[in-house]
Image (spheres, rainbow, N blue to C red):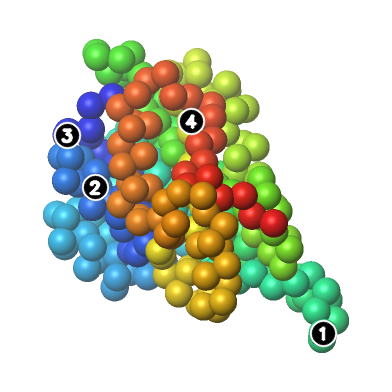
Amino acid sequence: MLINGMAAVVTGGSSGLGAATARHLAGLGAKVAILDVNLDLAQEVAAEIGGLAVECDVSSEENGEAAIKAAREAHGPARISVCCAGISESRRMLGRDGPAPLAHHTRLVNVHLVGTYNICRLAAADMAACEPLPDTGERGVLINTASIAGFDGPPGAITYDAVKAAIAAMCLPMSRELSRHAIRVMAIAPGMFETPMATGLRQEYINEMTDRIPFPKRFGNPAEYAALVETIVTSPMLNGETIRIDGGLRMT
């Protein structure tokens, strides 16, 4: 799919991977709508790229529907959807103070898993109503953000590991279901990246993780995630798969 002129929605586009993706797609000529709970930051990025900012809690059915509608009214139906919205609140299931509050687990499930599914179902409905593109015959592409934590299962982050594994698990069946509509579905599983989520990590942990990365021995740049989004959008044969982008890191 050619990106120039296409409408795109990016959740979590006010910072980190989402902001890098919004900037990259806009730089390639896409009309980008940023969906984020942090409206102020989203508006800053939107103003920079000439896009649209919409306040949205992705885990809310009503918020999701209103946000996709606003994006559609501004730019037309989105043929590119990238879900980057997420939070990092890892904690041990059983800590010194006893079991973790169930609300912690529920919050991560709602934001990451429910939120991703919510936006996918709404974006897919808009894509299905579009005419197939003349160059590839496809109607659109959904790209979701998993994590290598979903495969490697580091301790102290059971819920985060689980929701990221679930996002990867949704990829193939979602692509099979939406194939009759000529909609592709992909997931990206980043390793350690320089995002706001990483700023709260202990320096000892950052050093340890960096040392374990075979090459390059550094955290990823969000622009590299965005470049992979471009590759997926423009490569019709990429479908139903989760791609790791981690420098070869395997977490333990």
Residue under pointer 1:
96
Q: Position of residue 182 (x, y in %)?
A: 43, 18
- Mark toward the start of the polypeptide (3 vs 2): 3
The Cα–Cα distance between marks 1 and 2, rounded to whole angstroms, is 44 Å
- Mark toward the start of the polypeptide (1 vs 4): 1
**Residue 6 visible in image:** yes
Please state which amino acid type lies under the numbered disc 2: His
Q: Position of residue 17 (x, y in %)?
A: 38, 56
The Cα–Cα distance between marks 1 and 4, rounded to whole angstroms, is 41 Å
| Residue placed most toward the observer, 245 or 71 | 245
- Position of the N terminus by quadrant: top left
Look at 73% across and 63% down and name the residue there. Answer: 155
- Position of the C terminus by quadrant: bottom right
Disc number lying in front (3 or 2): 2
- Mark toward the start of the polypeptide (4 vs 3): 3
> Cβ–Cβ below 8 Å for labels 4 and 3?
no
Please state which amino acid type lies under the numbered disc 1: Arg
Look at 17% across and 33% down and name the residue there. Answer: 4
Please state which amino acid type lies under the numbered disc 3: Gly
Disc number lying in front (4 or 2): 2
Residue under pointer 4:
185
| Residue placed most toward the observer, 34 or 76 | 34
Residue under pointer 2:
24
The Cα–Cα distance between marks 4 and 3, rounded to whole angstroms, is 21 Å
